[in-house]
Image (spheres, helix red, strand yellow):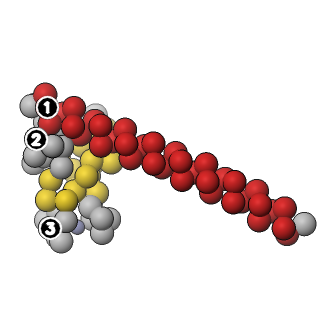
Amino acid sequence: MLRRDGTADCAECEMPLLPCSIEGGTVLLECANRHRATAPIPRDDLARRAAGSWVARRGAQLHAQHERWGTDDDVEEAHDR
Ligand SMILES: [Zn+2]
């Protein structure tokens, strides 16, 4: 179950599980060791919004990483030629 800050404890390593996406009625969570878990979307408004903001933050990070990788690939290709 999610806490009110949108996180939960990993059952395997006790690291915090952070929401990484929300699909249908389920929150998908991942801890720093990449253990995965799911939880139903909280009925509590505060917890639901907290989970949503974790997902948004993570999405922004992934997007930034993708942009960096894209740039690196272009540089490598240029070197190979
Ligand atoms: Zn874990």
Q: How many numbered circles are shown? A: 3
Q: Give percent across and percent down for residue 80.
A: 85, 69
Q: Is residue 11 left or right of residue 32?
A: left
Residue kind at label 1, given as amino acid type: Leu
Residue with the mark numbered 3: 14
Q: Earlier in the sequence, mark 1 or mark 2?
A: 2
Sequence-first tag of 1 and 3: 3
SS type, badge 3 = loop
In whole angstroms, how far apart are the C-alphas of marks 1 and 3?
Answer: 23 Å
Q: Which mark is residue 76?
A: none
Of the pair 37 and 80, the residue shown nearer to us: 80
Q: Is mark 3 within 8 Å of ligand 1?
A: yes
Image x and y of residue 26, in percent: 23, 40
Mark 2 C-beta closer than 8 Å to ligand 1 = no
Residue at 90% from the left image edge and 66% from the top image edge: 81
Looking at marks 3 and 2 on the same chain, the residue that comes earlier in the sequence is marked by 2
Judge left or right: residue 15 versus residue 54.
Answer: left
Q: Which mark is residue 46?
A: 1
Residue 75 image point, x, y percent:
77, 60
Q: Marks 2 and 3: in contact by CB < 8 Å? A: no
Label 1 sits on a secondary structure element that is helix
View quadrant of ligand 1: bottom left
Label 1–label 2 contact, CB within 8 A: yes
Residue under circle 2?
4
Residue 68: quadrant of the picture: bottom right
